[in-house]
Image: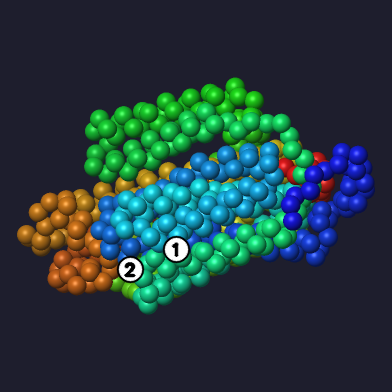
């Protein structure tokens, strides 16, 4: 069914029907809406984890190890750019239309990825997928804010962040199974039935009162943002060959100029993509800070787990998926646990302070242990601590930020929070990819036997899909595996100061009473 248009004369009747501390919709209708949103959330979450598990094999077959991080970076980059734009469009045209469009773009992108014949094509089509993912990530939480009071929202947001954890558990297993028994294009084609199911469910169940408002999309701001972020990502990626080269310095300078122009323009335009007034709110600003630092760690560094287990430890893709369960279990426990605590106590500040402290210790332990021939059992606790910190923080920061803004800013505040998380992830992944590649390229020659490789191209050609690494001569194989372990350990060493910054931002979050009405109940209109 289509979204209804609110009759202004009926607003009093709507208000009278809304209970102060209950979700806006009847329980039966609410369950259908939540179920529809869960399908969309699963669609975006499952794709990312399946691809991560299969990425070592994909990159090996397409001979693109030097572009390993870009398969994820481009996805997060386009998602980052799309998030504030689609959030703004949903405020103007309604959540349902924009969310369905995002699902459709994501599904088409999945089909194109399955048809890719080269690394360049795969990166391009992953960018298309990311455009759809930006809408899925932003609008799900915005809709929850529309229909569920902040006091009750914790338990529901916990379910959705928990869905990411479930997908993270199932994804590596599904991706590993497909790589071992089928071929890599199937990891993208599995999105098609999920996408169709999401479109049907949203069409049937997503019905909200909606009143169009006169507004404009800031296309100039979008262009400045896209140019600035693209320059930054490409500059970070090319920095692996040297940071003082003119092309790299030029890209980084262009990024600074374009991002500066974007911020200046956002302060002047009537309908900004990222309202600067939100940053004047200390609670929201602290949540934004936590999001950007934690996004880099959880989404950026997490990409390297499958690479470590498959290429450095020589395990199968399916086994690598099983080995990542501790961090995913931590995310699940953190997200759902934090939601229950908030709903029960009405307080949200202390949980991330304690869990992020544990996550910082976990990141440091990972950095120290991954560079050694450590037994897997010793990695379980550090991985779980990182997941617990990330899961609990994502839930609490979403609630705190939404609770601290006016109802008219619910959509854009949620979109901005997701935007900054994905921005952190894209910067982190590009930075981590550069650090990893540079570390391996400089570390591998000292480990290799004499005459094993003569150039940088020869060095990187040794790192192919896991089966080909196993086929290398024993001394060469061990050198490759040790260098990969060392490179991943450097990635997690960078995560430590990022986790500390996320913890500091969480400490700065001030606690205020949670609202007891849903967004639609306070505004009478969608968005």
Q: Is residue 156 above or below residue 213?
A: below
Mark 2 highlights which residue? 310
Q: Which of 264/222 is in front? A: 222
Query: Where residue 295 appears, x then y in whole percent?
Result: 50, 49
**Residue at position x 49%, y 67% in the image:** 190
Residue 214 shows which numbered tag? none
Residue 356 seen from this side: no
**Residue at position x 37%, y 51% in the image:** 123
Crowd band around label 2 with a 10 angstrom C-alpha radius: few (<14), some (14–19), many (20+): many
Q: Which of 457/219 is in front? A: 219
Secondary structure beneath disc 1? helix
Q: Quadrant of residue 466?
A: bottom left
Query: Where residue 236 appears, x then y in whole percent?
Result: 34, 40
C-alpha distance separating marks 1 and 2: 20 Å
Q: Quadrant of residue 272?
A: top right
Secondary structure beneath disc 2? helix
**On the picture, is 365 further left or further right than 343?**
left
Quadrant of the snapshot with the N terminus: bottom right
Residue 269 seen from this side: yes
Residue that extends furthest to the left in the rendered view of this protein:
451
Residue that extends furthest to the bottom in the rendered view of this protein:
181
Crowd band around label 1 with a 10 angstrom C-alpha radius: few (<14), some (14–19), many (20+): many
Q: Is residue 80 above or below residue 25?
A: above
Mark 1 highlights which residue? 188
**Residue at position x 45%, y 63% in the image:** 188
Cβ–Cβ under 8 Å for marks 1 and 2: no
Quadrant of the snapshot with the C terminus: top right
**On the picture, is 182 further left or further right than 264?**
left
């Amino acid at each position: 069914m289509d979204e209804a248009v609110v009759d202004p004369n009926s607003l009093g009747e709507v208000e009278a029907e809304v209970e102060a501390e209950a979700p806006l919709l009847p329980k039966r209708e609410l369950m259908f809406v939540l179920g529809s949103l869960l399908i969309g959330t699963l669609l975006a979450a499952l794709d990312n984890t399946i691809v991560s598990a299969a990425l070592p094999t994909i990159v090996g077959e397409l001979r693109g190890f030097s572009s390993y991080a870009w398969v994820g970076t481009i996805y997060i980059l386009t998602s980052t750019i799309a998030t504030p734009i689609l959030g703004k469009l949903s405020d103007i045209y309604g959540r349902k239309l924009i969310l369905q469009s995002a699902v459709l773009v994501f599904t088409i992108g999945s089909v194109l990825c399955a048809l890719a014949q080269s690394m360049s094509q795969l990166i391009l089509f992953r960018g298309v997928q990311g455009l759809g993912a930006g809408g899925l990530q932003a609008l799900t939480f915005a809709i929850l804010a529309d229909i569920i009071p902040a006091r009750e929202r914790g338990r529901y947001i916990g379910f959705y962040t928990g869905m990411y954890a479930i997908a993270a558990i199932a994804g590596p297993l599904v991706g590993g199974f497909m790589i071992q028994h089928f071929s890599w294009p199937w990891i993208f084609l599995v999105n098609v039935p999920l996408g169709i199911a999401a479109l049907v469910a949203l069409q049937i169940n997503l019905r909200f009162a909606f009143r169009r408002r006169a507004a404009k999309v800031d296309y100039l701001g979008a262009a400045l943002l896209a140019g600035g972020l693209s320059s930054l990502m490409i500059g970070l990626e090319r920095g692996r060959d040297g940071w003082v080269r003119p092309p790299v310095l030029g890209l980084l300078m262009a990024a600074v100029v374009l991002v500066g122009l974007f911020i200046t323009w956002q302060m002047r335009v009537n309908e900004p993509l990222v309202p600067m007034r939100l940053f004047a709110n200390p609670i929201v600003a602290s949540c934004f800070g936590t999001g950007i630092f934690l996004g880099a760690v959880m989404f950026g560094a997490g990409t390297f787990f499958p690479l470590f287990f498959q290429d450095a430890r020589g395990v199968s893709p399916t086994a690598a998926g099983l080995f990542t369960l501790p961090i995913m279990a931590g995310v699940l426990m953190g997200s759902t646990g934090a939601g229950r605590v908030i709903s029960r106590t009405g307080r949200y500040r202390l949980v991330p302070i304690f869990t992020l402290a544990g996550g910082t210790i976990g990141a440091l332990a990972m950095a120290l242990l991954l560079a050694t021939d450590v037994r897997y059992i010793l990695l379980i606790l550090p991985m779980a601590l990182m997941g617990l910190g990330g899961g609990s923080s994502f839930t609490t920061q979403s609630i705190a930020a939404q609770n601290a803004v006016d109802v008219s800013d619910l959509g854009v505040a949620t979109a901005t929070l997701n935007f900054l998380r994905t921005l952190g992830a894209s910067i982190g992944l590009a930075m981590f990819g550069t650090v990893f590649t540079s570390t391996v390229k400089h570390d591998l020659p000292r480990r290799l036997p004499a005459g094993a490789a003569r150039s940088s191209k020869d060095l990187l050609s040794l790192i192919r899909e896991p089966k080909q690494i196993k086929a290398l001569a024993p001394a060469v194989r061990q050198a490759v595996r040790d260098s990969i372990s060392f490179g991943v350990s450097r990635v997690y060493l960078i995560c430590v100061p990022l986790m500390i910054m996320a913890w500091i931002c969480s400490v700065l979050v001030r606690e205020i009473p949670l609202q007891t009405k849903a967004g639609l109940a306070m505004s009478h209109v969608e968005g």
